[in-house]
């Protein structure tokens, strides 16, 4: 068993939401997890790029490219979706990474959260996914390493390595 305060910033809300998704699997839990992941992602994104997104997918893009555009741009990097809709969007293929819970539930109406980019939120969700798969000490170790890695992603680097807007 692992105990973590759900109001502890910045990871508590995401851990609580992801835990609800793994255990309850409903639409509200999936949407809450996606929202908590987006919020944490904002903390680990370069300020000038936080609200940058491409308004529309390339007109020549295929169905998979349009889906990933939807995830990254319309859903802020984390999309709550049913397994059935996810499989339909990806031509029957459900990803084995960037998905919580993982592996995807067999019920096509079950809800999951999908992401593509690696960021602090994705690292935490990946850790929660491993904790759900490995409910013993190794799962706890995995989620703790994930939290450590995500915390490091939130720390600013040295000033000379920070992103700066060109004048």
Image (tube, rainbow, N blue to C red):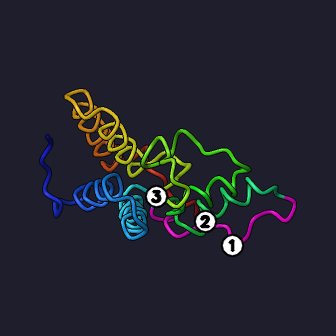
User: What numbered label is drawn on residue 46?
Assistant: 3
Q: Mark 1 and 2 residues: CB-CB less than 8 Å, in contact?
A: yes
Magenta stretch encompasses residue 53: yes
Magenta stretch encompasses residue 147: no
Q: Is residue 135 above or below residue 81?
A: above
Q: Position of residue 97 (x, y in %)?
A: 52, 40
> Could you tell me how far apart the alpha carbons at marks 1 and 2 are, in whole angstroms?
7 Å
Q: Would residue 166 be found to the left or right of residue 40 on screen?
A: right
Q: Which residue is mark 1?
A: 55
Of callouts 1 and 3, which one flags the residue occurring earlier in the amino acid sequence? 3
Q: Which residue occupies 34% across, 46% down? A: 124
Dot 3, how many residues are within 10 Å of its Cα: few (below 14), some (14-19), or many (20+)? few
Q: Main secondary structure of the magenta part?
A: loop
Q: Which residue occupies 67% across, 44% down? A: 93
Is label 3 in a helix, a strand or a loop? loop
Is label 1 in a helix, a strand or a loop? loop
> Could you tell me how far apart the alpha carbons at marks 1 and 3 are, in whole angstroms?
19 Å
The segment highlighted magenta reads: 47-60
Q: Picture quarter containing residue 82?
A: bottom right
Is label 2 in a helix, a strand or a loop? helix
């Amino acid at each position: 068993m692992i105990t973590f305060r759900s109001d502890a910033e910045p990871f508590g809300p995401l851990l609580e939401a992801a835990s609800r998704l793994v255990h309850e699997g409903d639409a509200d839990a999936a949407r809450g997890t996606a929202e908590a992941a987006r919020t944490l992602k904002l903390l680990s994104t370069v300020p000038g790029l936080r609200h940058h997104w491409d308004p529309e997918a390339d007109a020549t893009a295929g169905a998979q490219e349009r889906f990933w555009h939807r995830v990254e741009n319309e859903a802020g990097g984390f999309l709550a979706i049913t397994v059935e809709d996810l499989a339909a969007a990806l031509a029957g293929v459900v990803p084995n990474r960037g998905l919580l819970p993982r592996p995807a539930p067999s019920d096509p109406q079950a809800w999951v959260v999908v992401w593509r980019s690696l960021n602090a939120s994705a690292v935490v969700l990946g850790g929660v996914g491993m904790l759900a798969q490995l409910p013993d000490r190794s799962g706890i170790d995995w989620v703790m390493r994930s939290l450590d890695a995500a915390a490091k992603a939130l720390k600013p680097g040295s000033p000379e390595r920070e992103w700066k807007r060109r004048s």
